[in-house]
Image: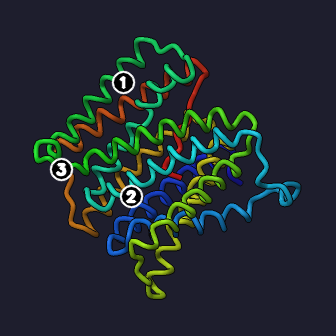
Amino acid sequence: MLTKNQLGFLYMFLSVCAFSIMDIIVKWSEDYPLGEVLFFRGFFGILFYFFIIPKDRRKNFYYTKRAGLHFLRCLSGLIALVAIFTALRNLPLATVVSISFAAPIFTTIFSIFLLKEKVGFYRWLAVIVGFLGIIVITEPGFSSLNIYYLYPIIFCLGLSYVAITIRQLSTTEPVWLISLYFSVAITLLSLLTIPYGWVMPNFYDLIILSLIGIFGGVANLWLSQSYKFSEVSLVTPLKYLALIFAIIFGYFIWGEVPTIKTLMGSSLVIISSIIIFRREIYHKNQVTVVRHE
């Protein structure tokens, strides 16, 4: 019988694996229009969340008094999702994952202006270290005018605002409803891209594409379960396994070898996010930054 902390570790590990597999499939799906891939992420995400709606909410599962905040959460989430999907298709896997770790840096900055939080010396130091890491990672892209290096940064900005809105919504809204509205928003937006040309997938590709939504759904569920069973401070460092997975899969599937600058920059970004995380724990005012749901 596993202890609660062991269950927390297991769920976090499964969450990281599911997100990593989703990233691989998104990168693999470059032959399909981005809007079509978003449809599979949203539609199968909707189907997944219907299985976890509590029985007493099945008749009015959609009810909310905070529609405006849900809209802002969905808008920022959509921007983040489109950005990360675009980045995954055009940049090395390890590079995208490395920059995505910078989301807590932007969350710290947003919390100052949106939540009126006070940020002390250590968190400001972490923000500076994190930005140095981003500069190190993206320098080759900027020097060669590769605009795709901007997309993981846009993802971090969007995801950071998502973290702020989820923090505000979670005081009154269940997690499944927040995620369900987001999946609906993804699906509706993706349907608007049909006139720009969708490609009919064969049966094999249909199964693979549907896994984007399924893995995205279970990854967030497992992430929530991890935080439920174990202390956040114990399981969060496991999220950095995603970089190891990205290096391994990127090398064996696409022949991508991370540069020294990518590894150095990612180390700075990880150190920065760990400092921020530890200070949030110290102040008992943590903002948990989920991934791209």
Q: Earlier in the sequence, mark 2 or mark 3?
A: 2
- Distance of label 2 from label 3 (alpha carbons): 16 Å
Q: Nearer the viewer, mark 1 or mark 2?
A: 2
Q: Is residue 196 left or right of residue 263?
A: right
Kindly give the residue lying farthest to the front in the view shown.
195
- Distance of label 3 from label 1 (alpha carbons): 24 Å
The residue drawn where x is 29% and y is 56% is 247
The residue drawn where x is 57% and y is 28% is 286
Q: Residues within 10 Å of mark 1 (few under 14, many from 20)?
A: many
Task: Please say if 91 is above or below 206.
Answer: above
Q: Disc 3 marks which amino acid?
A: Asn
Q: Quadrant of the N terminus?
A: bottom right
Circle 2: element type:
helix
Foreground residue among 263 and 24: 24
Q: Mark 3 highlights which residue?
A: 146
Q: Disc 2 marks which amino acid?
A: Phe
Q: Disc 1 marks which amino acid?
A: Val
Q: Residues within 10 Å of mark 2 (few under 14, many from 20)?
A: many
Q: Which mark is residue 127?
A: 1
Residue 50 position within the rendered picture, expressed as x and y whole percent measured from the top left: 72, 64
Kindly give the residue lying farthest to the left in the view shown.
144
Residue 64 position within the rendered picture, expressed as x and y whole percent measured from the top left: 76, 45
Looking at the rendering, which quadrant does residue 143 occupy? top left
Task: Please say if 213 is above or below 165.
Answer: below
Q: Which mark is residue 85?
A: 2
Q: Which mark is residue 174?
A: none
- Distance of label 1 from label 2 (alpha carbons): 25 Å
How many discs mark residues in the rendered view?
Answer: 3
Residue 127 position within the rendered picture, expressed as x and y whole percent measured from the top left: 36, 24
Q: Nearer the viewer, mark 3 or mark 1?
A: 3
